[in-house]
Structures are given as structure tokens and as C-alpha cells.
Image (spheres, rainbow, N blue to C red):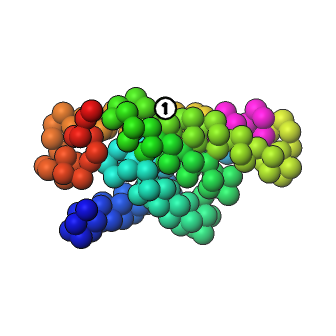
Amino acid sequence: MTFTNKLKKMTITAVIIAITTLISNIVFIPVGFAKIFPIQHMANVLTAILLGPFYSIAQAFIVSIIRNFTGTGSLFAFPGSMIGAFLSGYLFMKTRKLSWAFTGEVIGTGILGALAAYPVARLLLGKNVALFGFIPSFIVSSFAGALIAIFLMKVLLRNQTFGGIIHENSTYNRRI
């Protein structure tokens, strides 16, 4: 990979981080004690498809840090978002199918992330809130965000939006 290509990937990642941070601070769905941030999950999947699992993890990590410092994030979502970002990128990289990027985010963040954070949520929030509010909000949020990302990616690829950026930087065009 050339320096120019690395610079483009870092620039695209930074743009996704900025947009995700700004939008997720404004757009969220309150669900009882929790907030659902489908924008973060959408960014995880888009970054995973466009740039790969490691850029997706970096994006999820930085956005989570920023959102936690600004008070709009959730400490519970921090590890889950990175698990989902990695799994989404890894499965897409191996299969080159959008459906696997979607599945990776839902399984990684929605299920594995929720289960990883469940013990702390149960301790801090109580058993019923953690079980009936916390876990479903993780699943719904990751499902909605991943679905939006797949729809958006299909539209972008169909209309060839961004010119050659998607095809130049994406692993999507290197189909097996």
C-alpha cells in the first residue's frame, strides 16, 4: 500500500469519525434508560466495507472516546462497538458480501457486545433493566444501523457516488 493510499484511507476514516460524532450527538432514540445510536453502527459497517476491519476498529474506538467525553456515549457500548466493527470488517473481507458485513455488526455489537457488557450493566442497573432494556437496545441499535449502512452502500455503489473513491479504496471491488 502506498503512502497516498494510506493517507486517503486515514482521511476517509477521519471524515466518517467527524460525521458520526456530530450526528450521533444529535440523533438518537431514547429507549427507557438507554439511547439507541444507529448512526454509530452505520459508521462501523461503512468503514468496515470501505476500508477494512482495522480502520473500522479505529473509527469505533475514537468515536466512542469522543462520545464518552462529551457525555453522549455509553461506557457499555465501548467494547461492543469495537467487537462489531472488527467482526463486520473481517467477515466482509473474507466473503466480499454486504450481508456478512451486516451480520458481523449485529452479532458483534448486538449480541457479543451486549453479553460482554451485561455483567456490569446488571451490577449498575439491576437484573431486569439489564436483561429487558439493555440487551434489546444493543440488538435493535446494531440491527438498525447495519441495515441503514447496507442500504446506503448499495445506493452509493449503484449511483457511483464519490466517483472512484469507493472503488479505489474499497475491498468491495475485489470480489472473489
Q: Is residue 21 left or right of residue 172?
A: right
Residue 52 visible in image: yes
Q: What residue range appears in magenta? A: 130-138
Residue under the image location 36 percent in, 60 percent down: 13
Q: Position of residue 114 (x, y in %)?
A: 68, 41
Residue under the image location 18 percent in, 51 percent down: 168
Q: Position of residue 125 (x, y in %)?
A: 82, 47
Asked where in the image residue 135 lies, by quadrant, the reply is top right
- Give the residue number, with chain letter if any, for mark 1: 103
User: Viewer-proximal residue, 94 or 39?
Assistant: 94
Asked where in the image residue 132 lies, by quadrant, the reply is top right
Find out whether residue 100 is within the magenta segment.
no
Q: What main secondary structure does the magenta stretch of the protein show? A: helix
Identified by mark 1, the residue type is: Thr
Q: Position of residue 143 (x, y in %)?
A: 52, 33
Residue 63 visible in image: no
Residue under the image location 57 percent in, 35 percent down: 107
Q: Position of residue 79 (x, y in %)?
A: 63, 53
Residue under the image location 64 percent in, 36 percent down: 111
Say which quadrant the C terminus sits in. Answer: top left
User: Viewer-proximal residue, 94 or 152?
Assistant: 94
Q: Is residue 136 left or right of residue 169?
A: right
Q: Secondary structure at mark 1?
A: helix
Instruction: Answer above or below: position of 164 versus 18.
Output: above
Say which quadrant the N terminus sits in. Answer: bottom left
